[in-house]
């Protein structure tokens, strides 16, 4: 499976995930607003809350892995290019310059709050 196919598959899965949350979250909100919950509704509310807490944790894990992996690979590439550029490789020096610009743009776009 090539990149385009992987990209499309991930996008489909993310869209499906968002669609499923779009069904679950309104039910959760409705249950939260009820003043007198039946035993079944209270049980359902607890299950939904437990599930959403787990989902939030998984999303955080995925986000952390992505950030670490992308950042780690980028730094690895940066230092390999820098070593080659220091040895006089002009092609590596040009790539290094573009990568520095990209890093600079990324750092500017980060919301530090």
Image (tube, rainbow, N blue to C red):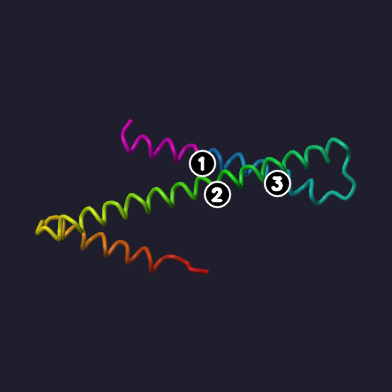
Where disc 2 sits, the SS reads helix
Q: State left or right for residue 69 relative to residue 53.
A: left
Residue 22 position within the rendered picture, expressed as x and y whole percent measured from the top left: 63, 44
Badge 1 crowding class, 10 Å Cα cut-off, few under 14, some 14 to 19, many 20 or more, is few
The residue identified by callout 2 is 60
Among the two numbered marks 3 and 2 on one chain, the one whose residue lies closer to the N terminus? 3
Q: What residue is shown at x 11% (from left), y 58% (from top)?
A: 87
List the residue tagged with mark 3: 26
Q: Quadrant of residue 83?
A: bottom left
Badge 2, how many Cα within 10 Å: few under 14, some, many 20+?
Answer: few
Residues in magenta, as a range: 1-14
Of circles 2 and 1, the one toward us is: 2
Residue hosting label 1: 15
Element at label 1: helix
Residue 61 percent across, percent down from the top left: 53, 46
The reply to whether discs 2 and 1 touch (Cβ–Cβ < 8 Å) is no
Secondary structure beneath dot 3 equals helix
């Amino acid at each position: 499976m090539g990149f385009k196919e992987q990209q499309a598959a991930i996008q489909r899965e993310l869209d499906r995930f968002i669609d499923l949350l779009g069904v679950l979250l309104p039910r959760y909100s409705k249950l939260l607003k009820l003043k007198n919950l039946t035993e079944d509704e209270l049980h359902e509310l607890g299950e939904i809350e437990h599930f959403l807490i787990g989902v939030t944790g998984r999303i955080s894990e995925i986000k952390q892995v992505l950030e670490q992996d992308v950042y780690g690979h980028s730094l690895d590439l940066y230092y390999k290019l820098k070593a080659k550029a220091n040895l006089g490789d002009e092609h590596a020096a040009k790539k290094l310059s573009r990568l520095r610009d990209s890093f600079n743009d990324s750092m500017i776009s980060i919301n530090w709050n």
